[in-house]
Amino acid sequence: MRTIHHITGGLTAALVFATASHAFAWGDVGHKIVCEIAFQELNPKTRREVGRLIHRDPEFKVFAESCVWPDHPQQRAEEHFVNVPRDFGAFTAQQCPMAPQCLFTGIESEMKVLRHSTSDQAKLAALKFVGHWIGDLHQPLHVSFQDDRGGGKILPSGACVLTLHAVWDGCIVEKKLGTEYRDVARDLAETITPSDRATWTATGVHVWANESLDIARSAPVSYCVREGKSCVYRPGNPTYDPGEPEKVVVVDEAYLERNAPIVAQRLRQAGVRLGYLLNTALGK
């Protein structure tokens, strides 16, 4: 894996979008990495069907690049993340805890389209949505808290800019893994073993969400502070209140080095799991 020492202008633009809410995840490079790994995981029948559908798309001719579509412009924003209470335990089912719609409903509805629809237009849209949303689900700060917008109300100090959410969207990916999505996807895929595939695909979507939430609440991320059963914004201040000064997290080289393996693993898992889901829907 390569270390990138400068954020490109494209990344800066992507991070600007990320400040608005926590509906954007991974940035374009991360989403393309996930879907490129997934494409390599497809069986021959599924790969032919994905290729056939993408060939009908007026904008994209490569599956990996189509996975950015739900962000440009943003579509169905409420289904790009899962908000949980700050004292939340764990998901036991694919259900949204705080809203009628979230990533769970988005993934479930579009998987039904892929499995059962006879409309190529509907299946093409579902393919692009599912590709994007499985990536979103594996970005840890997309399973998080509404009041601080998944880290959108936390400021980084150091190697990255804008927000903590933006750090995880793109800064870690592009600084520590690379900017060429095909190269990064190849490097990450080379380390995936048959045992990894079996383990990662043996669980359901709600378990994948639990993984992201556990990472988001872990100490290396510096997203929240554990107080009893709650994950608070900062000591003595359980939630972010609009208008108050935003807390600052140091995101230095040590932070990037510490969290880059986590990001790499989430990209691998997202790619393998997306490939598995597409194979179950389109490859039988």
Image (spheres, grey):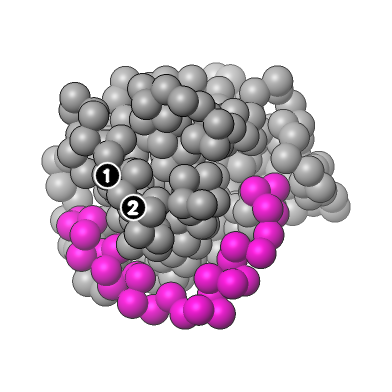
Other residues around mark 2 within 10 Å, as few (<14) / some (14–19) / many (≥20): many
Q: Are marks 1 and 2 in contact (CB under 8 Å)?
A: yes
Judge from the rendering whether residue 108 lies leftward or rightward of residue 182; answer left or right: right
User: Residue 21 appears at what percent x and percent y?
Assistant: 47, 26
Judge from the rendering whether residue 206 lies leftward or rightward of residue 29; answer left or right: right
Please, what is the three-letter code of the amino acid marked with disc 1?
A: Gly
Residue at image location 23% in from the left, 29% down from the top: 56
Q: Is residue 89 above or below residue 184?
A: above
Q: Residue furthest right?
A: 228
Q: Is residue 197 magenta?
A: yes
Quadrant of the rendering where the N terminus is positioned: bottom left
Q: Is residue 258 magenta?
A: no
Judge from the rendering whether residue 96 lies leftward or rightward of residue 173; answer left or right: right
Judge from the rendering whether residue 199 lies leftward or rightward of residue 58; answer left or right: right
Please, what is the three-letter code of the amino acid marked with disc 2?
A: Arg
Q: Residue 84: which quarter of the image?
A: top right
User: Residue 32 appears at what percent x and percent y?
Assistant: 30, 48
Towards the viewer: 127 or 71? 127
Other residues around mark 1 within 10 Å, as few (<14) / some (14–19) / many (≥20): some
User: Residue 28 appears at what percent x and percent y?
Assistant: 29, 42
Which element carries disc 2, helix, strand or loop? helix
For residue 233, say whether it is visible: yes
Residue at image location 22% in from the left, 71% down from the top: 2
Disc marking residue 77 = none
Towards the viewer: 113 or 199? 113
Mark 2, residue position: 47
Mark 1, residue position: 51
Residue at image location 35% in from the left, 70% down from the top: 188
Q: Residue 65: which quarter of the image?
A: top left
Residue at image location 73% in from the left, 40% down from the top: 94
**Magenta region:** 179-207
